[in-house]
Amino acid sequence: MSDKQDRIFDGWADRFDQRIYADNNPKGRVRQAILQRDLTEILSQHARTLDIVDVGGGLGHMAIWLANQGHSVTVVEPSGDMLERARQNADAAGVEMQFVHSTLQDFSATPPRPFDLIVCHAVLEWLAQPRAALDQLKGLMHTQSHLSLMFYNVHSARMRSLVVGDFERANSADLGGDGIKRLAPLSPLDPQDVHQWLETSELVCTRWSGVRTFYDYMLPDARARADTEQVIRTELALSEQEPWRSMARYQHVLCTLPSDKRLNRNR
């Protein structure tokens, strides 16, 4: 049995910002571009203000974008300093949001209400028991809710090890980190497993995209001279095409309840 424990990023706010978002980092810009494109599909279906929860909302970038679209957003984050940074970022952006200092497990145990949209990005891979989290997220849904789930792809972790010649790690049965020594996810996930979990949990995948299909594999000098706008355009174009989608660093899926469940529960 694994002795891994969920990773909470107290003291890591600056490092996350520098690694993903600072100085218009293409990593963060590609991530936001694909997620925003996918989520716009949901937002455009509703003329009303949506009640949204961002579980593991981190620095608040996605939550702020959603709030700027006119929606009511609650950020749930277990790291105190990450939550404070999200609050500061929201103040700087001039948007109002709710902030809850909590883990997914605790928040889902006594949720204040069901939400219209549940956002959970780059959280499952930092949990010792990611499968259980899916049912906890489902518990935050009502019959017409949407779930936006992004997770770290184990195939990308293996490819990255191969690209740098780390064959020992690439051939390892467990590509997860220990959550202590370095910023390597505890539980990188196989997309096939996650899709099976969704089916078992009676959730229907309505859209599936890859986030950063090639950028993370580029050589450093190629990255340095690449035009960021061209990178984003190409990433957007490849994000729903195989085989590129399945090799992306992250996988993003949008989910709902099956149509029969939605109808039956509304009777």
Image (spheres, helix red, strand yellow):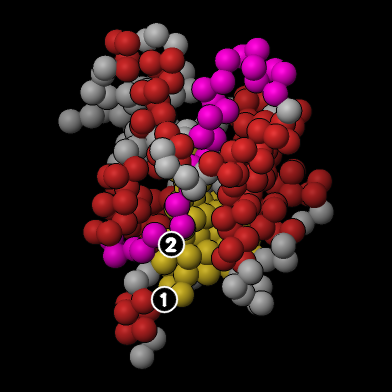
In the rendered structure, the answer to whether residue 59 lies left or right of residue 135 reads right
**Which residue is tagged 2?**
206
User: Is residue 25 in view?
Assistant: yes
Secondary element type, mark 2: strand
Pointer 2 local density, CA inside 10 Å: few below 14, some 14–19, many at least 20: few
Residue type, numbered disc 2: Thr
Mark 2 or mark 1, which has the lower sequence index?
A: 1
The extreme left residue here reads: 1
The foreground one among 264 and 57 is: 264
Any magenta on residue 138?
no
In the rendered structure, the answer to whether residue 189 lies left or right of residue 15 reads left
Would you identify the image quadrant in which residue 189 lies? top left
Q: Quadrant of the C terminus?
A: bottom left
**Which residue is tagged 1?**
143
The foreground one among 144 and 254 is: 254
Pointer 1 local density, CA inside 10 Å: few below 14, some 14–19, many at least 20: some
The stretch in magenta equals 201-226
Residue 148 against residue 32 in the figure, above or below: below
Q: Quadrant of the N terminus?
A: top left
Query: Residue placed at 51% from the left, 34% from the top?
Result: 213
Residue type, numbered disc 1: Thr
The extreme bottom residue here reads: 267
